[in-house]
Image (spheres, helix red, strand yellow):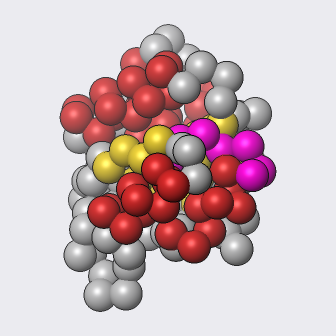
Amino acid sequence: MTTPRFLTDRVAVSPQIDPSEIAALVDAGFVAFVSHRPDGEAADQPTHAALSAAAEAAGARFVALPCRGLPGPEAVEGTRQVLTETGEGKVLMFCAAGMRSSAAWAMASVADGARPDEVIATAAGAGYDLSRLPL
């Protein structure tokens, strides 16, 4: 099973998850899943439709905010909205390796007033180097 890396007490990132993992992740407290990976980026990845169906079946929310490279304004704003709307619930964001999701979280956090140096340090603590990210 995927082992999420927590950026905060309620926000985690990971590489690609499989629909078969979602029920266990919901049992672990996740209430929302955000994919920053476009459908079809790799031949073996599950589709957003399959992930959404698994999340719905487990009673969780699924949001697709696909991006390539640096997350654009829509992915950043969508990430910010999901984080705001889920309140205290845990959110798992994923892409191929977790870097795009970490970047989207960082950019959304700075847009909400977080200090860039603190966001970069938090991501580094989870294993993601965002030092070159234009925050």
Name the residue nearer the viewer: 57 or 63: 57
Residue 4, horizontal then vertical, whole percent: 68, 57
Residue 100, horizontal then vertical, whole percent: 41, 54
Q: Is residue 41 above or below residue 133?
A: below
Name the residue nearer the viewer: 95 or 85: 85
Quadrant location of the N terminus in the rendered image? bottom right
User: Can the viewer see residue 12 in this picture?
Assistant: no
Q: Which residue is painted at 50% across and 69% down in the image?
A: 19
For this orientation, the residue located farthest to the bottom is 43
Is 30 contained in the magenta span?
Answer: yes
Q: Which residue is painted at 58% across and 53% down in the image?
A: 58
Residue 82, horizontal then vertical, whole percent: 44, 30
Q: Is residue 84 above or below residue 132?
A: above
Decide if residue 42 is on the left or right side of residue 113: left
Decide if residue 135 is on the left or right side of residue 30: left
Task: Write down the quadrant of residue 127 in the picture.
Answer: bottom right
Is 82 contained in the magenta span?
Answer: no
Name the residue nearer the viewer: 54 or 114: 54
Quadrant location of the C terminus in the rendered image? top left
Name the residue nearer the viewer: 26 or 64: 26
Task: Write down the quadrant of residue 46 in the picture.
Answer: bottom left
Residue 72, horizontal then vertical, whole percent: 23, 40
For this orientation, the residue located farthest to the top is 113
Q: Is residue 92 above or below residue 14?
A: above
Q: How many marks?
A: 0
Q: Which residue is painted at 54% across and 44% down in the image?
A: 60
In the image, the segment drawn in magenta is: 27-33
Q: Which residue is painted at 32% across and 32% down in the image?
A: 78
For this orientation, the residue located farthest to the front is 57
Decide if residue 40 is on the left or right side of residue 16: left
User: Can the viewer see residue 33 in this picture?
Assistant: yes
